[in-house]
């Protein structure tokens, strides 16, 4: 006797709700199936079945997969997760019995089966045991964009899909950082979702689509939606920004946001900074830092030399005074030897008093280099710039002596350049009057960039010829430790506890 063949499993995407949006392949598979399975709540009504209703025949074996719990509480000993795991295991066993008997099983799924769909739980439990095919469907995201009649993403824009069940703070960060977004699974989550849009500054852009392509469809501005009226089958949409007019309700007038890009590229940007860069009409900054920011259609970039901070700040404020949203781009953290001070100094003049100015923090070079080396800044430390372009060397030397006498770890910015070659040697000699020659010094060059080089040397061995403007120096205190670990790793760290006496 020949061994009986098993049946075939299909995950059938039905699209967003309108039966006319089912694919030809989906209709064919339902017609071929022996068993049609679909999920439903305990009331027994299945949206998936209603979409495919005219293709379900009397001779089809129907398998309703009824959730034991949806939004209500449960007395299952494993809680909600335990109840659902038990349900999925039981549902998979029911489908497996049909497949073992040689029957073809079509599991219906709204939208796309593998996009936030219930089918995926059956797929994970059965696809490795039975021949399986997934029939993709039109997602609610595509349907919502079509109903809004506006581009969802364009060019190099990034689309972020978010479940409304995320914590509000996480939603806020994600919305602030992305170009375009769709937030799904609304219903009871809507107040928190709306709060996230508002906190991220994106509420004026946000649209709302309910039951796209289905009966009872509703489209409007998210800010105008009554929270008590929002069903689960609704999405919030941030459409493309490219070419879009400033949304009604958005703040009038211009502003200046001074943003820190961190020590290198996009990995070091905060969500808040990403959002400010994406929303800006104009980017103003030192050309090297502007080059770290992706080019966006419609944005105007104003690059300049690194030694015209005041002129750059005045230019940015003048643009904002004319109604432009301006991002002044700074490396590292804009408040640490960078552009925030220059902008605020000019903004303090009476003629710019009405121009809003925000300073958005970034990862500064000291923190970046310290993280690469270990934790040399684990105790009290001082941050000093060795550049004597804006203050006399005598002031720098006196501050170095004071910090060294206080036994502070030192983060030394702007240590040298082509025109400043002697400051590092002078600083080293001064510190050796107060520190052991074996004091560890971390040299962090181009941290996060393609030429990154982080290494540690003894203070006595610090060679000024190996230091340039792209390098930061972290000089340990008397307590800083330099330790070799397994696999050749070396770490530098400063204990949080300082010895008494």
Image (spheres, grey):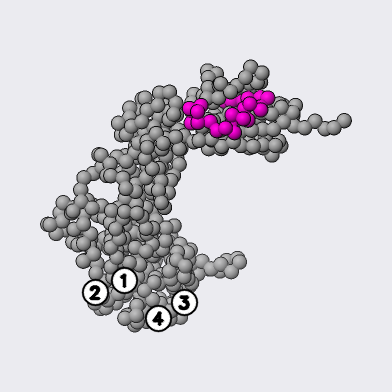
Which residue has dot 4 on it?
A: 464
Q: Position of residue 275 (x, y in %)?
A: 35, 50
Q: Callout 3: few (<14), some (14-19), or many (20+) C-alpha neighbours within 10 Å?
A: some
| C-alpha distance separating marks 1 and 2 | 10 Å
Mark before the other along the chain sequence, 1 or 2? 1
As measured in the structure, the alpha-carbon distance from the residue carrying label 1 to the one carrying label 4 is: 15 Å
The residue labelled by disc 3 is 458
Q: Dot 3: what SS?
A: strand
Asked if residue 157 is positioned above or below residue 377 in the image, the reply reads: above
Residue 332 locus on image (x, y percent): 36, 62
Please tell me which residue lies in front, 141 or 165.
141
What percent of the width, then of the height, locates residue 224? Answer: 30, 31
Dot 2: what SS?
Answer: loop
In which image quadrant can residue 96 be found?
top right
Which-is-in-front pick, marks 3 and 1? 1
* Disc 4, SS: helix
User: What is the C-alpha distance between the residues marked 4 and 3?
Assistant: 13 Å
């Amino acid at each position: 006797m020949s061994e009986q063949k098993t049946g075939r499993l299909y995950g059938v995407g039905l699209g967003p709700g309108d039966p006319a949006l089912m694919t030809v392949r989906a209709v064919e598979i339902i017609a071929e199936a022996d068993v049609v399975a679909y999920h439903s709540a305990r009331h027994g009504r299945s949206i998936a079945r209603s979409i495919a209703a005219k293709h379900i025949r009397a001779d089809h074996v129907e398998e309703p997969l009824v959730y034991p719990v949806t939004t209500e509480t449960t007395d299952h000993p494993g809680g909600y997760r335990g109840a659902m795991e038990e349900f999925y295991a039981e549902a998979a066993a029911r489908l497996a019995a049909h497949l073992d008997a040689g029957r073809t099983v079509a599991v219906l799924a709204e939208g796309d089966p593998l996009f936030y769909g219930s089918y995926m739980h059956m797929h994970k439990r059965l696809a490795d045991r039975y021949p399986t095919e997934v029939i993709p469907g039109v997602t609610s995201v595509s349907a919502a964009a079509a109903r809004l009649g506006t581009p969802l993403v364009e060019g190099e824009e990034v689309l972020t899909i978010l479940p409304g069940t995320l914590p509000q703070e996480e939603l806020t960060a994600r919305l602030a950082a992305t170009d375009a977004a769709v937030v799904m699974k609304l219903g009871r989550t809507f107040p928190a979702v709306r709060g996230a849009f508002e906190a991220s500054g994106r509420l004026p852009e946000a649209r709302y689509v309910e039951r796209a392509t289905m009966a009872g469809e509703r489209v409007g501005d998210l800010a105008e939606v009554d929270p008590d009226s929002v069903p689960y089958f609704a999405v919030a949409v941030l459409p493309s920004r490219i070419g879009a007019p400033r949304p009604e309700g958005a703040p009038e007038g211009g502003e200046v946001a001074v943003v820190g890009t961190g020590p290198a590229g996009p990995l070091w940007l905060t969500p808040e900074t990403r959002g400010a860069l994406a929303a800006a009409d104009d980017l103003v900054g030192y050309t090297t830092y502007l080059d770290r920011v992706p080019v966006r259609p419609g944005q105007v970039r104003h690059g300049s030399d690194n030694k015209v901070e005041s002129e750059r700040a005045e230019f940015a404020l003048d643009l904002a005074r004319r109604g432009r949203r301006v991002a002044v781009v700074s490396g590292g953290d804009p408040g640490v030897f960078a552009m925030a001070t220059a902008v605020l100094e000019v903004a303090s003049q009476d003629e710019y008093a009405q121009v809003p100015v925000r300073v958005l923090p970034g990862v500064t070079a000291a923190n970046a280099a310290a993280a690469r080396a270990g934790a040399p800044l684990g105790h009290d430390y001082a941050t000093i710039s060795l550049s004597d372009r804006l203050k006399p060397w005598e002031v720098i030397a006196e501050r170095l002596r004071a910090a060294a006498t206080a036994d502070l770890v030192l983060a030394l910015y702007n240590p040298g350049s082509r025109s400043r070659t002697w400051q590092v040697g002078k600083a080293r000699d001064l510190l050796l009057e107060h520190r052991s020659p074996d004091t560890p010094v971390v040299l962090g060059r181009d941290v996060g960039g393609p030429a990154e080089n982080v290494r540690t040397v003894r203070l006595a061995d610090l060679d000024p010829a190996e230091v340039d403007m792209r390098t930061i120096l972290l000089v340990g205190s008397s307590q800083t430790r330099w330790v070799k670990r397994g696999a050749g790793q070396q770490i530098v760290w400063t204990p949080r506890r300082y010895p008494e006496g």
